[in-house]
Amino acid sequence: MKTLDQWFDEYAVSHQNPTNKKIHYLCVPAIFFSIIGLLMSIPAQFVENILPFDNPLIENWATVTLIFVLLFYLRLSVITTIKVLLFASLCVWANHLIGKYISLPLFSLIVFVIAWIGQFYGHKLEGKKPSFLKDIQFLLIGPAWVFENMFKTNTQTKS
């Protein structure tokens, strides 16, 4: 099994162009957010019947899916799992609010499509194919890589 650093090193190979990186910092979280919205849009009667909660923030397909996503991250890093859990929780809450005012499936689909167009444009600039075409697991590595790079502290001092 690869370590998180090995995944990041391999992912970084096709994410060197500064513009592509900036696009990813915006589009990867947007795709993650939109997928949660799309999953929350699926009728959840089955989930509501098996979970002992009476809360739409918990009883939905996004939450069920996130359990498995978080287990994937937990195999790699507790800190990364916590970062993704915090972001995912924010996504669930925000999508719940959005769904009260507008069509959540339509909004999520629009964000999803626009963000993927951005991703492919970034890879066109990069001149390299998206990593997930090599290994589908990179669809989960992308968010972790973005969080790691966006919140990385520079510990080097200037001379």
Image (cartoon, helix red, strand yellow):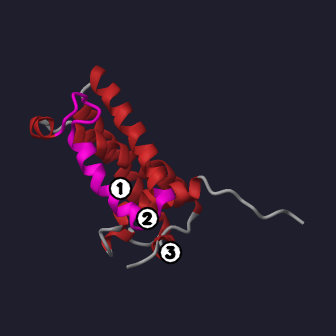
- Picture quarter containing residue 142? bottom left
Asked whether 139 or 27 is in front, the reply is 139
Residue hosting label 1: 70
Residue furthest front in the image: 52
Asked whether 92 or 146 is in front, the reply is 92
**Residue mark closest to the camera, 2 vs 3:** 3
Is 63 in the magenta? yes
As drawn, the label of residue 123 is: 2
Asked whether 52 or 66 is in front, the reply is 52
x 13%, y 41%: residue: 50
Part of the protein shown in magenta: 51-80
Q: Amino acid at mark 2?
A: His
Label 2 Cα crowd, 10 Å radius (few <14 / some 14-19 / many 20+): many
Label 3 Cα crowd, 10 Å radius (few <14 / some 14-19 / many 20+): few
Asked whether 32 or 117 is in front, the reply is 32
Q: Is residue 10 above or below residue 22?
A: below
Residue 74 place in picture, x, y as percent? 40, 61
- Tag 1 and tag 2, C-beta contact below 8 Å: no
**How far separated are the C-alphas under marks 2 and 3?**
12 Å
